Every structure is written in C-alpha cells, then in structure tokens.
Amino acid sequence: MQISATVNTHPVSDERLAEILADPGFGNHFTDHMFTVEWTPDAGWHDARIEPYGPLTLDPATAVLHYAQETFEGMKAYRHADGSIWTFRPEANAERMVTSSHRLALPVLEVPDFLQAVQELVRIDQRWVPDTTEPGAGEKSLYLRPFMFASEKFLGVRPSQHVTFMVIASPAGSYFKGGLKPVSLWLTEEYTRAGRGGMGAAKTGGNYASSLVAQQEAAAHGCDQVVFLDAQEGTYVEELGGMNMYFVYADGRIVTPATGTILEGITRSSIIELAQKMGHPVEERRFGIEEWREGVTSGEIVEIFACGTAAVVTPVGSLKWDGGEVPCAHEGGEVTMAIRKALVDIQYGRAEDPFGWMHRIV
C-alpha cells in the first residue's frame, strides 16, 4: 500500500508518557496515531493513511451499528533488551483476519497489507513500546488492535459496500489486576457462546458480546471468568470468555478442547508446538465437563491453565457451578509455569526462537 502520514502536532508529552508507561493497565491509554484504509467495490482498498489518534465521525445509519458486521485482532509489540521492537507471529493474525472476513462477508485485506499497516503504526509510535529492562517493569508491551467494520450509511440487510480497516495501539501491563494468580471459573449451564455453523471460529465482536451476560453471572458468584460448554449437548468444554484452555495430566500429556466452533487461538497453537518440543504430548479433542470434574478429584488432572494474547498463560484455580465446586489450585503448577516462561522468554527476546515466531519491526 501507499501510505500517507500526518504527524500528530500535539503528541503526549514525554513526562506524561513516562507516567502512563509506569502503570499502563490494559486498554486505558492510546498512542498518538492510528492507521486507516477504506474499501469500496469499485476502488478496492484505498486512501491508506496514518493520522493523529482521535474520534471517528459516524452517521447514525452506519451499518456496523445495526448489524455488527465487523472483525478484529489482538497482538503485541515487545521491546527487547537491545531496544529493538518485535511482534509475535503477526502473519498468523493477518491470516486469521482473512478467515474472519470470509465468515462476516467482509472484503479481504491481504496478509502483506495487514502486516504493513501494523508495522508502520508501530514505527511511528515506537516511543510507546514500554522498556522492560528496568527493575520491576514486568511483562509490559504495546497491545495492537487491528479491526475492520461495515462503514456504509445503509439500513438494508446485506454486506456493506463501504468498509474501513483500522489499527490502534495501547500500552499494556498485566491483563489481570493483582498479578499472576490462579483464576476462579464459573460454569454457565444456561448460556452458550457458539454452535455448529455459527461465528465462534471468527474473531468478531458479537462473540464477545454474547459472553458478557455469562461473565456477569460468573462475577455474581465470585468468579473471575466463565466457562462455556458446547451448544448441542451441553457436555463438552469449549472455551472461556476470552481464552482457550489446557488440562495437564499426571503422566505429562496435555489435552486442549478441539476447535471448529471456537476461535483458533494463536497463543493456543503456539503452546501446542512449544509443549510438544518440551516433551509433552498434546491431544486436541472433545473434552467433557465430567472428565474435568472427575480428573481433578482423582488426581489424574494435576494442572489446568488458560491462554490468550492479552493474558498469555494464566493458571486456573477452582471451578464452580450451581450446586458444586472442584478444588482450588493456589498457585501455578510446574508445567504451566514452565510453558509460560518459555513462551514469554521467546516474546521478550530472552531465549532462542527456534520456531521463527518473532518479526523485527524496529
């Protein structure tokens, strides 16, 4: 793409940026610029630009506001000890957006164009990528949010004839307040998130919207996250509100629920490769809720963890449901923490990257 750039003449001051990067939280602050490109059937993708970050002006009849035709991605940029900046498997995010776009009847933004958009925004806003070499810095990064939406002013039910793709960026600290500790889970037996032929395998906002009422249910029962079962039988574990799941057995093997109706997580697929390299056979298959309950109770399942771009790898503690509970883990298990460390060390350049996952931007 030919990308024009308009530099923000009123960027965040160095002093204010230092305050933000000291404690960024998650999704609270945004960089000085944003990327935008538009699509129409006649012109294709056009008018690619980087401009100062700011509000959008949308007509009340903009299609996405009524029919939720949109997709998004989540990824991170990491600053290594030598000051260089890298992204983790960005081509996988680009390819997944292609898949999501097909499912939502949106135009495809080709992988090289997706990568270029992300890279150019990171380059122009590179001062926003936190330094993780300082004592107590923790696992900070620059969270990147590419997204695409139906921007045509039209109330008919059909694919939009005007589409906008954007990338915004936000410095990020730990996803969970209070640091890394086992999350408690609530098993919803009333709500499901995705079914056969649905949109569960696409990264679209509607999937997350549908999880919110169940997440409220979890919070009302004192739990951090919600667990969804399959829509057809209500028997098989699928995913959490925003993360995939893994079950570690006493013999060293690891089981993760099969995809198809759930999102093909990039962190999830990375862990499969990493765990196998570390000597743990990984099974992708249907995983019943009774296998979870009985496995923990008998000691056959010794660790459980969840994963996602924002949270990376998070140990799982108790599982609660209406009328029952399985025991709580008070800290991350040996396998969980070893996998987490191996993945994070690759991302931050502290370990060799034998998979070729990291891509240098600056």
Image (cartoon, grey):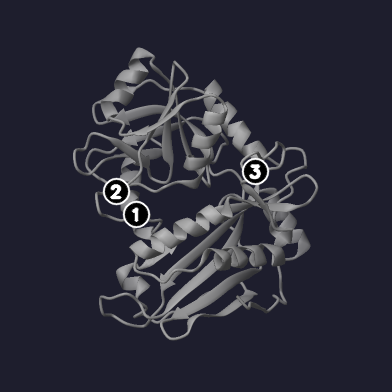
Image quarter (top left, top right, bottom left or bottom right) of the N terminus: bottom right
Picture disc at residue 193: 2
Residue reaching furthest to the right: 82
Of the two numbered discs 1 and 3 in the rendering, the one whose residue sits closer to the viewer: 3
Earlier along the polypeptide chain: callout 1 or callout 3?
1
Whether residue 332 is visible:
no
Is 253 rendered above or below residue 17?
above
Of the two numbered discs 3 and 2 in the rendering, the one whose residue sits closer to the viewer: 3
Q: Residues within 10 Å of mark 2 (few under 14, many from 20)?
A: many
Q: Residue at x 35, y 39 (%)?
A: 258
Where does label 1 land, which residue?
207
What is the three-letter code of the residue carrying label 1? Answer: Asn
Is 174 rendered above or below residue 180?
below
Q: Which of 335 and 55 is in front in this view?
A: 335
Image quarter (top left, top right, bottom left or bottom right) of the C terminus: bottom right
C-alpha gap between disc 1 and disc 3: 28 Å
